Image (cartoon, grey):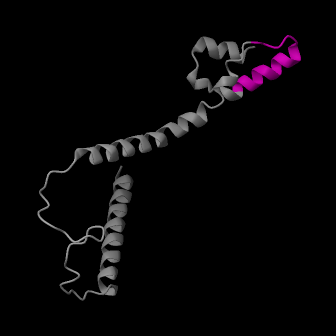
Amino acid sequence: MTVLVGYLLLFVFVAIFFVFFHLMIGKLVRPSKMNPEKATIYECGEPTIGSAWIQFDLRFYVIALLFVVFDVEVAFFFPWAVVFGQSNALAKAEVPATEEARVVYVEHLKTLTPLHAMTPEQRQLVLFM
């Protein structure tokens, strides 16, 4: 337990040092001459007019949120698609008639179906066919 705590503290110390070190290097290297033009608010090349506290059309916000939700959803569906992409081969209704072809068919089924996802009856049927 103490070794784990030691590694955790070492990791936290290295992480804090890494961030602090790079922030300080950036502060020393970057130019920092401030002038009034640099201090102005910049928004898409347009000069700001009026207050920022205006009514905003929520349709733009909703569309952006929907895009983010469905974009992230695709990232979660990709592993499922990879795992279950060959599932149509499991739905093959015909079982080969000859014994040699049946052995090849069962071996192919074993590669498509993870054993941990089967019920004990299905596992026994596949393993002892």
Q: Position of residue 7 (x, y in %)?
A: 38, 58
Q: Does the stretch in magenta take in 55?
A: no
Look at 76% across and 24% down and name the residue there.
107
In the image: residue 126, left or right of residue 97: left
Q: Does the stretch in magenta take in 97?
A: yes
Q: Position of residue 92 (x, y in %)?
A: 72, 17
Does 46 sit above or below residue 37? above
**Which quadrant of the structure image shows residue 35?**
bottom left
Magenta range: 94-110
User: Foreground: 11 or 47?
Assistant: 47
Quadrant where the C terminus sits is top right
**Which quadrant of the structure image shows residue 113?**
top right
User: Foreground: 21 or 47?
Assistant: 47
Does 53 sit above or below residue 76? below
User: Foreground: 62 or 78?
Assistant: 62
Look at 22% across and 72% down and name the residue there.
47
Look at 20% across and 72% down and name the residue there.
41
Does 73 sit above or below residue 50? above
So how many labels did they put on this image?
A: 0
In the image: residue 97, left or right of residue 63: right
Which SS does the magenta portion mostly show? Answer: helix
In the image: residue 54, left or right of residue 111: left
Does 113 sit above or below residue 52? above
